[in-house]
Image (cartoon, helix red, strand yellow):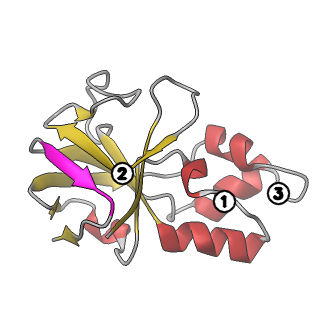
């Protein structure tokens, strides 16, 4: 299920929480910083598991918000790593899971604080950072919609 949807209109701008979003095949999320700008596979849209955000907060005594991972779609009840190399849908929209969305140094720096260094943050998110996917069909995504394989 979609728990939250975020877009950032420009690079390094704050993630904006929205209830629904249009996605275009091969281009990504309308209004997002990466819309139609990336031509590499897997950069149309990113997903992260709500359960991994909660586990990070619990395991490391943190309190990051759902938007702090800078992923577009926060899911709940879905094992995203299992979708690498597979097609899946949310409503009428089809996706292809390209690769795991492994943490980068920018995520490490943004979540680092007095109790966690940037390398510790990156290590904590290895194999837990979510999924990069391609948008295969145009449509609308809304909070509460279910993901189906």
* Front disc: 1 or 2: 2
- Decide if residue 70 is on the left or right side of residue 37: right
- Please provide percent x and percent y for residue 55: 62, 75
Q: Mark 1 points at which residue?
A: 123
Marks 2 and 3: in contact by CB < 8 Å? no
Q: Mark 3 points at which residue?
A: 116
Q: Which of marks 3 and 2 is in front?
A: 2
Above/below status of 77 relative to 107 = below
**Distance from label 3 to label 1 (Cα)?**
11 Å
102 on left or right of 85: right
The residue sitting at 17% across, 52% down in the picture is 95
For marks 3 and 1, the one nearer the N-term is: 3
Q: Is residue 16 above or below residue 66?
A: above
Question: For mark 3, does the 10 Å Cα neighbourhood hold few (<14), some (14 to 19), or many (20 or more) residues?
Answer: some
Task: First in sequence, mark 1 or 2: give its number.
Answer: 2
The CA distance from mark 3 to mark 2 is 32 Å
Residue 142 magenta: yes
Q: Is residue 58 located in the magenta-colored stretch of the structure?
A: no
Residue 52 x, y percent position in the rendering: 54, 70
Q: Quadrant of residue 76?
A: bottom left
Tell me where residue 42 sits by quadrant: top left
Q: Which residue is drawn at 68% across and 58% down?
A: 64
**Mark 2 neighbour class, 10 Å CA radius: few under 14, some 14 to 19, many 20 or more:** few
Marks 1 & 2, CB-CB < 8 Å contact: no
**What kind of element bears circle 1?**
helix
Q: Which mark is residue 19?
A: 2
Picture residue at 30% right of the left edge, 48% below the top: 20
The residue under the point 37% across, 31% down is: 32
Between 141 and 110, the residue placed more toward the observer is 141
Distance between mark 1 and mark 2 Cα atoms: 31 Å
* Residue 22 percent across, percent down from the top left: 22, 40
């Amino acid at each position: 299920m979609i728990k939250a949807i975020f877009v950032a209109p420009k690079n390094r701008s704050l993630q904006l929480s929205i209830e629904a979003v249009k996605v275009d095949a091969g281009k990504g999320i309308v209004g997002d910083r990466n819309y139609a700008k990336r031509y590499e596979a897997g950069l149309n849209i990113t997903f992260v598991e709500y359960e991994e955000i909660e586990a990070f907060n619990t395991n490391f005594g943190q309190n990051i918000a759902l938007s702090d991972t800078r992923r577009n779609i926060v899911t709940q009840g879905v094992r995203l790593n299992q979708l690498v190399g597979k097609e899946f849908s949310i409503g009428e929209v089809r996706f292809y899971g390209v690769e795991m969305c492994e943490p980068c140094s920018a995520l490490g720096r943004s979540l680092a604080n007095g109790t966690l260094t940037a390398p510790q943050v990156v290590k904590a998110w290895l194999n837990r950072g979510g999924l990069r996917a391609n948008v295969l069909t145009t449509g609308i995504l809304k909070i509460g919609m279910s993901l189906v394989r």
